[in-house]
Image (cartoon, rainbow, N blue to C red):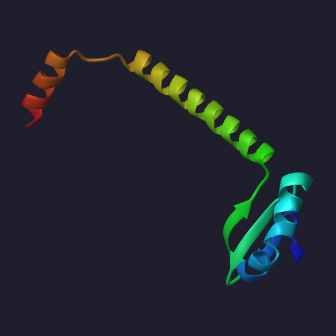
Amino acid sequence: MSISKSNHAHLPVGTARGQFMEIANRVGYGGERVVIERYHKPIMALISVADLELLETLERQYDVELARARLKSIDQAGTLTLAELKKTFNEQY
């Protein structure tokens, strides 16, 4: 097993298959992150539930920030009524 500069273990898929229980324990109980590779290219990563929960929290925060930014841009740009939109559309086409 090699360790990259980011401290992730990298394993070929065949090795990971043969050592799955050991890897699962290291990830689940030791908090390690393991990148599974096929032909020296990463195809998946195994992470702990704690890391997954953190990732999901970060994704939710990003989604909220993105929604707020879009709502702010709508407030700044203004909106059209359906009638105004239809009129604009009909004038263009």
Q: Is residue 7 above or below residue 80?
A: below
Residue at (41% x, 21% y) in the render: 74
**Between 9 and 67, which is closer to the camera in this rendering?**
9
Q: Position of residue 2 (x, y in %)?
A: 88, 76
Image side of residue 92 versus residue 44, left or right: left
Above or below: residue 8 compared with residue 59: below
Residue at the (74%, 60%) spot, across then down: 46
Query: Residue, x 89% and y 53% (percent of image)?
Result: 29
Q: Is residue 46 above or below residue 58?
A: below
Residue 16: quarter of image:
bottom right
**4 shown above or below 80:** below
Please state which of residues 22 and 62 is positioned toward the viewer in this rendering: 22
The residue sitting at 14% across, 16% down in the picture is 83
Image coordinates of residue 8 in percent, x first then y, are 84, 64
Measured from the top left, where is residue 40 in percent x and y? 71, 81
Residue 82 image offset from top left, x and y in percent:
18, 18
Q: Quadrant of the C terminus?
A: top left
Total number of numbered discs in the rendering: 0
Q: Is residue 27 left or right of residue 59?
A: right
Q: Nearer the viewer, residue 85 or 17?
A: 17
Q: Is residue 17 left or right of residue 61?
A: right
Q: Quadrant of residue 50?
A: top right
The quarter of the rendered structure image containing the N terminus is bottom right
List the single residue furthest toward the right: 30
